[in-house]
Image (spheres, rainbow, N blue to C red):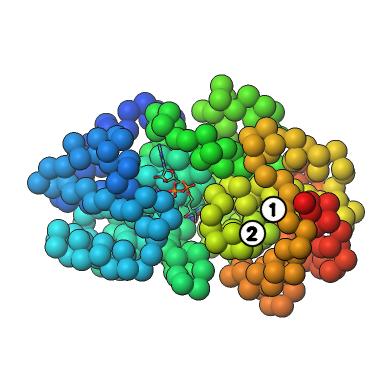
Amino acid sequence: MKSISINAEREYQVKFVEDWHKAFAEISQSHAKTLVIAPTELIAQFNLDSLKSPSVQVIPTPNGEVAKNPEFLLQLWEVCGNFGLTRSDAIVGIGGGSTTDLAGFVAATWLRGISWYAIPTSLAGMVDAAVGGKTGINSSHGKNLIGSFHSPQSVIIDQVFLKTLSTRDFNAGMAEVIKSGFIADRRILELAGDAESNIGELIWLSIEVKAKVVSVDFKESREREILNYGHTLGHAIEKLEDYELRHGEAVAIGLVFAAELSNATGNLSSEVVDKHRALLSKFDLPTGYRRDALPQLLELMASDKKTRGSSLRFIGISAVGKPIWLEEVTADQIATAYERIAL
Ligand SMILES: NC(=O)c1ccc[n+]([C@@H]2O[C@H](COP(=O)([O-])OP(=O)(O)OC[C@H]3O[C@@H](n4cnc5c(N)ncnc54)[C@H](O)[C@@H]3O)[C@@H](O)[C@H]2O)c1
């Protein structure tokens, strides 16, 4: 079995397995009680009820993002109490990023933190959400505003899950893969030309990028910010679209904007900017946004939780694999870059 090691508040492994059932059996055997959290549709699709036993409970969540809400979290804490989960027991999240974010947050908060494991089933979950220790839920004030850094004991990657993933969700996950390529690994961009055939290696390399960054700066004091390439505008677009776009779709637009901004500030060649458009379009990802939305987007970016102080900061690149911090961007440069992605 191949694995990638992550050094966060402690070391843990992202394990690449042939059969996640075996990995799950090992997990459940090492704890007196295991609480599985998974979306209703995936419980049916992957027959997760068959995991149930006197020591394993399977709790369905609503599908997708709606599960990450405070009301549902209250219900899950009740479940933990009724099941009698103690400090030596564990929670396992099986699902996309919404599920692993939620499962991780329940584990972070129940008894001030118990063990948890992530079994991501979406591409976005495998290459991003389940790796890195950020857990959380949404507030009426915004996405992921309630959260905690709480690393899993391990992350189990089994590509079998991708077989049932919709094309839209696969493509949205590719936006994060492509982001990893631009900030850190040219090889990812080469392999993305034939993503279906190269998906195993793409997942591996993308996780390696995230693992390296997170191991240097777990709590995002600076180095980890490079993972936000494309996300400053992306988050604002997600919010403006009332979360109707997939995260990766909004990030795709944000990536082209961040590349254009890198170009408008004199840091990046037009060829590399074009490469963003070419690769993202291959996955039917959007690369532009409404011209008239800029004022609203600027306001939303200014209120993003990742903003520090009053000036807008962006992550850019100066070449493939060379991230830079754009800290003194002028309003003119933003307007120039935005005009180039405006529809
Ligand atoms: N913690 C982090 O560092 C981090 C990083 C990035 C994103 N996220 C979070 O991750 C979430 C986005 O992740 P996502 O795109 O996986 O969303 P998701 O979990 O909402 O999944 C999208 C849809 O795909 C379905 N699905 C998942 N796996 C499937 C499979 N194998 N077959 C069929 N359908 C499947 C889900 O049920 C859902 O309907 C957001 O909530 C975002 O905030 C967290």
| In this picture, residue 152 sits left or right of residue 123 | left
| In this picture, residue 301 sits left or right of residue 95 | right
Query: Which label belongs to residue 34?
Result: none
Query: Which label belongs to residue 254?
Result: 1
Residue 172 image position (x, y, % from top left): 56, 42
Q: Identify the residue shown where x is 54% and y is 28%.
A: 199
Residue 137 versus residue 126: which sits nearer the camera? 137
Residue 62 image position (x, y, % from top left): 33, 53
Q: Identify the residue shown where x is 83% and y is 56%.
A: 339
Label 1 residue near ligand 1, CB within 8 Å: no
Q: Is residue 278 visible?
A: yes
Residue 111 versus residue 337: which sits nearer the camera? 337
Q: What amino acid type is highlighted by mark number 1?
A: Gly
Pointer 2 residue: 237
Mark 2 or 1, which is nearer the eye?
2
Label 2 residue near ligand 1, CB within 8 Å: no
Quadrant in which residue 109 is drawn: bottom left
Label 2 element class? helix
> Which residue is most to the right?
266
Residue 272 image position (x, y, % from top left): 81, 40
Please say if 332 is above or below 167: below
Quadrant in which residue 238 is drawn: bottom right
Q: What amino acid type is highlighted by mark number 2?
A: Ile
Residue 242 versus residue 57: which sits nearer the camera? 242
